[in-house]
Image (cartoon, rainbow, N blue to C red):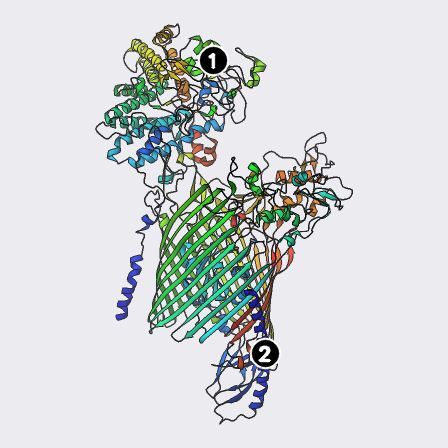
Amino acid sequence: MKNLKRIILLSLPLFFMAGCDENFEEINTNPTAILKISDPGLLFTNVLRNTSVGGSWDAESTIVQHFVLPYILGATVGYQFNENVEAANGAAFGMYTGNLRTIEHLMSLIKDDEARSNMYNQTRIMRVHHYMYLVDHYGDVPYSEAEKAGSEGIFYPKYDKGSEIYDDLYKELKEATAALDASKPSSSQYDIFVAASASSATQMAFWRKFGYSLMLRMGMRYSKLDPTGTGKAKEIVQAAFTGGVMQTNADNPAILNMTGSGVGTPIVGYTNGRNGIRGANVYYYYVAKPIVDQLKSTNDPRSKFMIAYYNGKQNTAPSIIKPDVDPANQYGVPVGYSDGTLQSVKPAGYRPPKGDGLDYSQINYNVVGNSTTPSVIITNAQVKLLLAEAAKRGYIPGGDAQAAIYYYEGIDASMDGYSIYPNVAATAVSNSTTEVLALPTVAEKTAYKAQVGVVYNPATALQQINTQYWIECFNNGYEAWSNFRRSGYPALSPNLYNNNLNGGFIRRNSYPLREQTSNPVAYQEAVANLNGPDYLTTRIFWDIP
Amino acid sequence: MKQLYLLVSMVLLVHVGAMAQRNELSASGTSTKQNSNVRLSDQTVLGVTGRVTDETGAAFPGVNVLVKGSSSGQTTDADGKYSIEVPDANSVLIFSFVGYATQEISVGSRTNIDVKLALDVQALNEVVVTALGIAKESKKLGYSATTAKVDEMTSNRTNNMMSSLEGKIAGLDISPPTAGPASSNKIRIRGQSAFAGSDNGPLLVINGLPMSQGAESANGGQRDRDGGDNFMLFNPDDVESMTVLKGATAAALYGSRAAAGAIIITTKNGSKTKGIGVEFTSGVVVDEVLDFTDYQYEFGQGSNGVRPFSGANAVSVGQLGWGERYDGVMTPQFDGVSRPYEAASTNRIKDFFNTGVTFNNTVAVSNGTDKGSMRASYSNMEAKGVTPNNEYSRKIFSLNLNQKLGDKLSVAVAMNYTNSVNENAPQVGLQGQGYMNFILRTSPTTPLWAYEQGATNPNGSERITTGFGGTILNPYFYIPRQFNIDRDQRLLGTVSARYQFTKWLYLQGRVAANYNFSNSESNNPTGGGGYGTANQGIYYDATLTTFNGQYNVRQASGSDMNYDFILGGNHTFGDFSVDAFFSANRRHTDGRDVNTNAQGFQTRDVYTIGNGTVFGQGSGYSQSEINSMFGSAEFGWKSIVYLNFTGRNDWFSVLTPGTGSSLVGDNSYFYPSVSGSFIFSELTEDKLTWLNYGKLRSSWAKVGNTAGINNYYGNVSYTYSTQQYLGRTIGSVSATVPNPNIKPYSLQETEIGLEARMFGSRVNVDMAVYKKVTSDQILGVTTSNASGTGSIQANAASLTNKGFEFLVDVVAVKTGAFTWTTSFNTAYNISEVLDLGPGVTRQTITDFYNNGGSNEFIGKQVYEVGKPLAQIAAKTYPRDANGNVLLNSNGRLYVAPGQPDVLFGGALPLYTGGWNNTIRYKNLSLLVHFDYKAGGKMISGSNLNSLRQGHSKASLVGRREGETGIVFPGVYVNGPNAGQVNTTSVPAQTFYGDIRGLQIADDFIYKSDYIKLRNITLTYDLTSLLSSKTRFVKGLVLSGSCRNVALIKSFVDDLDPEAVASSADARAGYEAVSLPTSRSWGLNLNVKF
């Protein structure tokens, strides 16, 4: 009996240990790493800063014939030669391991944080932009099961239908925009779109306009599906319009890109995402004939910001402070030719090679092609032009009269929008080291708008509005391409370098090859749901013939 | 000096031994005389005579006859007769002979005692130390547990004691890499349990303290020196017993640490000593480098059949042996000096490497009383490696204490402190500073002394000797300038207390600690050729103010603590017995390290942090904990059937969600086992008289391992930008996404075994068949990017290992004083990769060449579904459908676009085993041990280089008399004669250069099979010859041994098939820049006082 007592006493420690994992949380917490972010707002800044806006010069921008890379350089052979290449196809998908991962992580951190409800809803709006970007590029993409490797152990997410993703994004956008609450704390200290000191009211007003403008863009994406103005396009556009879209260029959510202290060198990591072509051998890169001809034929005051003629070899940009920006001296590379076929076929507008490159206009590396060029997620000019079309189509009231007003406002906003670009100011400065280009004057804008073909014409309104949209989106290949697919304007001629596209246009990206091998089951299901093969010419849900 | 003294004292001791023998002889002479005067009434001295016979009734010479309690004794003569004096009628005589049951016989009133010795069945019914140090009769075990012969480890001494067990235990595959005197072993029990990267070395348990084998293998570019393993912490002289628990069932009580088997070591605690004992062991081992190369010494340095024409040209072709036929004409060499054009040496490996010498001295003091025992020992090992400047010294202090406190409570303390310094462990598996790379690849036209004298340029930078400036570096530049010193201290301690409540119930508590502290320093000297020739080869910066080179210092410390309790008991109810315990364990590890490096030295050749101008530093900390509860219950019936169940539950801190963790998975895993034994000989006792013992055993277990889940695995961390963006700080979440559902991999093993002893126990057989399946292995799997990450650690792969083990042990001859015991063991193990994750059929484990990126030579190790592990994959000759090699129209090898790698076979041996013979005659015993491995392949980077650089005899093809190049058998793939048989000759240098360029491996793949005469040991036990006058010496054993005596069968050119530089799984079967193997000669003396 005495022994039994002893046994029990001595065994007690055993049971204290038994099943014991009580200190494990502490033990499994790395004391040398930052495991609790001091402020989730730091991630919010990251999300805004790293938002993809325009795609790439040598992918999306070549489809809409803003840009061309006529050289067959192996790795750069892509959409300009109607080639279905991984580099171009895979780019947008990179969002999943990039900004979307941060977005989902941030949302999981602040989901139930009352004090950060505004930041949460702002992040939801950003998430909508990212998924629209993905759907617009591929069609069906992983959505409901995406971004769940770390949280739920889903490594091979299924693909959701693009239309269903859009439905959910619309719900998200409505809820998130409506939930922005000026009575709740602002997050302006992390918000790169507003002043760090902005009040909650100011910040929320800005974001509400941004949210509804994104909703307007979303609604207009349905225009082909809603030809009669009785369906989703009208519903969503009206909701956006009623909610209150962007009014002025000050409402532009612009991701600014920074230079170092006064020397013009960009700060590493804080440069424009579409900066890739600036690295080396810029004499391979040119603007395409359709955009050059459009700018030239209308003597467009924006031309000087967009395109320039460089005399001589350009190894890295910008090596010429004052390129020739006179519209009369600009020549675009005809679409559908390589440097080789250009010289053998000598199509209309052909110019013989010069130096190491071709004798055509390039991007103005001082302004639009600059490493510090801002990326604007959605511009006031785009909003005005979308409203013009919405009015014209009757999604919102006003008809042609109101459409014309929005149309002209859109052109003005587009011209004024260059004020935040580098080397652009109200007045020109030109000396041996600097050239600052002047913004279009009122007179120039008026003259431009008064031209035949530019002046609002109810009969050709849709073509005019969307041609302006195409010009406005010169620095945003993604939006130019999406709007081109939706509206069919401008009436571009297909790239006939080869018959890869059967004489059509690229209407989506193929899924990245990596998905075929790393997510084969879901990939096959997704392909089966496409309106055709997993190819560039297959149309996504809102892009019906 | 110290060593000299030891040698002298050893010789003296041998001399004393010889004198003792003479004394003994004279003593026995007088005792015969006294015997005739014996009277029963004489109470002081009695004479006893008699005859000893063996189990067959034959005379048994050489049997030890001792008077119990004294040191006086003798051995029986050729007729088995003895004659001895005993003090009184209460005296007890002890008759003993190895392998026979010792008999103790009271003298009483008898003057003649005849004895028949029987084979020691008890020894066969031995007690085996099993998991947790629990001693069990082997008949009760339902799994394979093999006890190592500890004395063979001390007489055939190796620096790492496991090396001496190579080929001795079936199923224990030991591969000592050729990486210096302080290198780790590759030890795999029943094959490689899991994929490379997991810890597949056995769990090492020393006096109840579990630790991983901890092999720090050389790993090519990632780690160029072998850092040894935990078996080096012990002195074999301290080892009392070693048990190899082969299967998962045997080790199941170790739960998540048991997946690769376990080796249980207990150290001597003095309990076998009665009174105070002193033991002294002294040994010396001399290592002689073996050279298997059979290179050509006909053609000298040069390229395309032209000898060097200038010093600069001699440098550019320094590694090439494609010159002219040797003629002795003065020819410029790398240093601009002209020397005769001839092979300066045909023995370069032996010229360069030293003779290694290892001295080992141990002194141990022990004391045993009925209240307890103690043993303290100190050993010192000083080893000089074969590589210049390589020295390894090790001091081990070991202390064991056992004390009974009253009737029921006893405490025990075991401590082992190791202090080792490893200086300049050789760099292996690496080009550049790997010395063997230079010795094998640099043309033998230049004498080594010229490389030594001309090692530097006038400014003190390395004088480049070959066209491979940065990859073939002159050892003579580095030997005096480079250092790499690892100082390690390790304290292993176990303190336990046991309370015996009743005869059948006990409680034991134990704390086992493993503390380590290490400090290491290394440099890369100023001016080394690896820095290139920029800035005159010695300056760090363009301003020529600071010197290049690097100095690194690292300090690390850590602890691995185990706390456990066992409540155990046993009881017998009639025919039934129960033996059970319940236990709980907590294991806590922590470690921290700080490292600093300096570059840009202000003063040349002073390697300190303070002398640097550019610094780097890092530090780390981690901790983890595993808590466990486990228990075992064994049920026996009539000593015929035993059934044993064990279960263990582990809770892992690394699987526990914590701050910043994404883990959602369970942190608790259960590992069960069941085993049984059936001693069928108990039932056949009357019918099968030839069967002395027969047991059938069977077991099943499931264990696991968290390998691949590092500490803080689940932690999601953040970083902040250092530059402000628009006045804002950007925060980022770590790019690595942890798998929230990660779990330990699991291993299930089934085993059936048979043990039998027959014919008077002269034939012993032990065999086992097993199958183990390792599933849910943790691999980095490629995921959809849409999941948020492109790859993740996941439980995705599985493999099996199947095999059998067979041991037969035969007392082949036993006539009189002569016995020959021969024992043969063999094991077969074949692995198969079952699964590599969804859609994956091949995974590259190591890409040795990696398009030149890995600074290595050729081939890959891959895993392929359906194939054994560790396949050697490489390019092969491109062939047409008929098997003809395809050649370009110029006769050179055709490059097939996108030619895939082919599999040349598995690198792991299928068969391992050995044949061990012990021949005893009286006190002399001779051990002759052969071992072998078969069924594996290896790939040789050295042979690739010796062919393409014109050094091997194979490179003579195409340039022998009358030859003008190689007309390779094959067909043209292109050109006007496409499809026709090749007749175009290509210069040998060009052709072999193409083989290198195209990475065609066919000529460098070998069977790594071998048969070796591994070891001969001659031991002379002088104990029984000691005179009663030298009774303070209780034992004296002298042994001499030779290790790696002969390579009897091999299929590899110019190499020892064991010349693999790394003990890591990922580099199995890959030879390149390993040290030459050595033959060791050893002399060992053990004296007990």
User: SS of the residue at dot 2?
Assistant: helix
Q: Are marks 1 and 2 on the same chain?
A: no
Residue B246, can we see it? no
Quadrant of the rendering where the C terminus of chain A is positioned? top left
Left/right placement of residue A133 relative to residue B193 reads left
Residue at image position (33%, 74%) is B407
Residue A172, horizontal then vertical, whole percent: 30, 28
Left/right placement of residue B615 relative to residue A351 reads left
Q: Between residue B952 and residue B1, name the one nearer to us.
A: B1
Q: Tell me: residue B887, above or below residue A28.
A: above
* Residue designated by label 2: B19
Q: Answer few, some or many: residues within 10 Å of disc 2's Cα (few below 14, many 20 plus, some between 14 and 19).
A: some
Q: Answer few, some or many: residues within 10 Å of disc 1's Cα (few below 14, many 20 plus, some between 14 and 19).
A: some
Q: Amino acid at mark 2?
A: Met
Q: Amino acid at mark 1?
A: Asp
Q: Chain of mark 2?
A: B
Q: Between residue B315 and residue B496, name the one nearer to us.
A: B315
* Residue designated by label 1: A324
Residue A60, horizontal then vertical, whole percent: 44, 22
Q: Between residue B47 and residue A84, name the one nearer to us.
A: B47
Quadrant of the rendering where the N terminus of chain A is positioned? bottom left
Q: Tell me: residue B75, above or below residue A162.
A: below
Q: Tell me: residue A487, above or below residue B130.
A: above
Left/right placement of residue B562 relative to residue B123 reads left
Q: Measure the alpha-carbon separation of dots 1 and 2.
A: 111 Å
